[in-house]
Amino acid sequence: MSELKKVIMETAKLNGDETENEIHARLMAHRDSQWDGFIRNHVSFDTNGKPEYIVSFWDITEFDTGVLPKGQRYAYIIA
């Protein structure tokens, strides 16, 4: 059975002209720059098919203070 899970969602703006190799490297760097608890990430594209944002999801940890830095928001996912 699936359950609703509250997570932290982090976004990072892309230039829109990245190659697939650059996107891959940025996804890996975005994942590795954070604490444990990584769930998944993806790249979203604009309506013209250009890469727009890296979006990553993280478990909420005991270090969460309730005040998130710029680029982070709370979200719900099905886990």
Image (tube, rainbow, N blue to C red):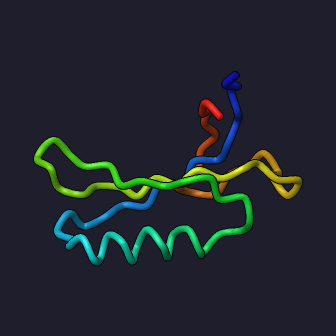
All told, the count of numbered labels is 0
Q: Residue at x 24, y 67 (%)?
A: 15
Whether residue 25 sits left or right of residue 74 in the image: it is left
Whether residue 56 sits left or right of residue 62 in the image: it is left
Q: Quadrant of the N terminus?
A: top right
Q: Residue furthest front?
A: 1
Would you place residue 74 above or below residue 58 in this image?
above
Would you place residue 28 above or below residue 79 in this image?
below
Quarter of the rendering containing residue 53: bottom left
- Expressed as whole percent of the image width and height from the top left, the position of residue 67 reads 74, 49
Q: Residue at x 24, y 57 (%)?
A: 51
Q: Nearer the viewer, residue 45 or 28?
A: 28
Q: Residue at x 85, y 58 (%)?
A: 63
Q: Residue at x 65, y 59 (%)?
A: 38
Quarter of the rendering containing residue 75: top right
Whether residue 6 sits left or right of residue 30 in the image: it is right
Q: Quadrant of the C terminus?
A: top right
Q: Residue furthest left?
A: 48
- Expressed as whole percent of the image width and height from the top left, the position of residue 44 reads 32, 49
- Expressed as whole percent of the image width and height from the top left, the position of residue 74 reads 64, 40
- Expressed as whole percent of the image width and height from the top left, the position of residue 9 reads 57, 48
Would you place residue 9 above or below residue 75 in this image?
below
Whether residue 46 sits left or right of residue 31 in the image: it is left
